[in-house]
Amino acid sequence: MLSVISYPVFVLSVLVSLVLSISLFPVGWYEFRPEWLGLIVFYWTFRAPAQFGILFAWCLGLLLDVLEATPLGVNALAMGVIAFLVFTIHQRLRMYPMPQQCLMVFLLLGINQMLVHFLKQMLGGEDAGFSYLWPALTSALVWPLFSILMDNINRKMG
Amino acid sequence: MPGLRLLLVIIVSVTLVVADQHYDRLTPVRSTLATGLTPVYWLGNAPYQFSDWVVSLFTTREDVKQENEDLKARLLILERRALKYAALASENNELRRLMNSSELLDDRVIVSQVVSVSPDPYSHEIIINKGRSDGLQVGQAILDAHGLMGQVVQTSQVTSRVLLVSDSSHAVPVEVVRNGLRAILLGTGDSATLDLVHVPDTADIREGDLLVSSGLGGRFPRGYPVAEVSLINKEPGEPFVSIQATPKAQLNQSRLVLVVFPPKDGVPALPTSNNNQAPAIDKVPGGQG
């Protein structure tokens, strides 16, 4: 749990994650792009569950819907569910060592991706096999770096 | 308490999804949000512009001079062709007038830049830097220097979203240049192949045939190259041939695109009685195409 929350850092991190969601990844490797916004939702609900929760995650998901041109509400729903799950386990999550945290990131973001693809397929999208789980895996791999970096920035700015 | 919020979020989301899929009421909401997100699109494009700038820093004067000369030579060739084209166009218009048919040969276009590619690897969409403030509307055709790229599916104030012909939900009515055979060209989700569907077994079609937009859907202008037939596979016993085509436009590479504006209220008045009908047909909103 963070002692101080720096709101500028929060706003900046959201903005950067939105930009990263649509940019800065080599063509042909889009499949493996980490789910940046999912990571941001995970991080802030984990570190500051009293301030950021389901509704905030839902709003961010809605923005992602607009960016990705998915039907409004698909990503929003998935993000809300992630925030809820993180909220219910955040006390246990703090006790976990880093590898176990990574596993949780993989599981929860996997659930997020699964929900998104389930909804998209119900609405007439194409079936892409299990490759939609790649972002969950890459997100889990970047989680240690990501969380340490965010913690440091927060400590400096807060 | 969180459970209650989750329930609320789920209900609102499902309502939104259903409303967005089945009614058009949410289009303004989406386009307002997209306008608000313009800085994000902007920043997303910034690294590319920055790298372009860095590359331009390290170009030598000789290279620029060389390129300039090449471009001048190319311009000369194209201008000569345009001269010939102008004569042909006027002759064609004259002939059409004589035949009492009405059709505009030249469309109004504006140049636009691709600012972002859809982050979803399963949908083929790009975002261009022209929007409602430039007069863009949903349904307009997008071209690059080589052929048809796609159509505008959503507009915000300063950007628009373009669905490419290779998206699996996209279809274009086309015809074979050589003999006018009509068919529908579907996207496959792979940017290098398109499927030409419902072509009968006996149809006269060959590999290498150029497919141009037929304009029959009422959405795309007529006569722009779309794809080239690359593979024909005749299965004995199947009523239709399976045909693959390669898109002419460079869907993955083009940075500059052209937005085609439909002719304003049909054509300039011609002294014939049936010129009211032709534009009217053009305005029928096309199915998928």
Image (tube, helix red, strand yellow):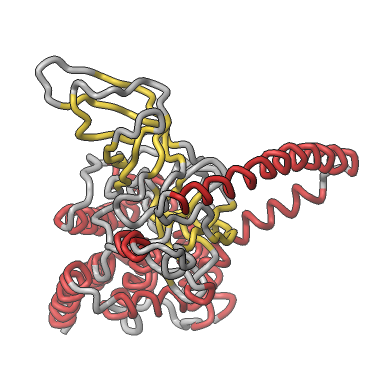
**Residue pushed farthest right?**
B61
Residue B14: x percent and y percent?
A: 15, 72
Q: Residue at x 40, y 53 (%)?
A: B101
Residue A107: x percent and y percent?
A: 25, 53
Looking at the figure, which quarter contains the N terminus of chain B? bottom left
Residue B107: x percent and y percent?
A: 52, 57
Q: Is residue B229 left or right of residue B171?
A: right
Q: Residue at x 51, y 61 (%)?
A: B128
Q: Residue at x 30, y 21 (%)?
A: B232
Q: Nearer the viewer, residue B185 or A72?
A: B185
Residue A95 vertical position relative to residue B146 in the rendered view, above or below: below
Residue B269: x percent and y percent?
A: 46, 68
Residue A37 vertical position relative to residue B89 in the rendered view, above or below: below
Residue B159 vertical position relative to residue B70 in the rendered view, above or below: below
Q: Is residue A100 left or right of residue B67?
A: left
**Residue pushed farthest top?**
B236
Whether residue A39 appears in this view of the structure is no
Whether residue B229 appears in this view of the structure is yes
Q: Residue at x 33, y 67 (%)?
A: A65
Q: Nearer the viewer, residue B251 or B172?
A: B172
Q: Nearer the viewer, residue A1 or A74?
A: A74
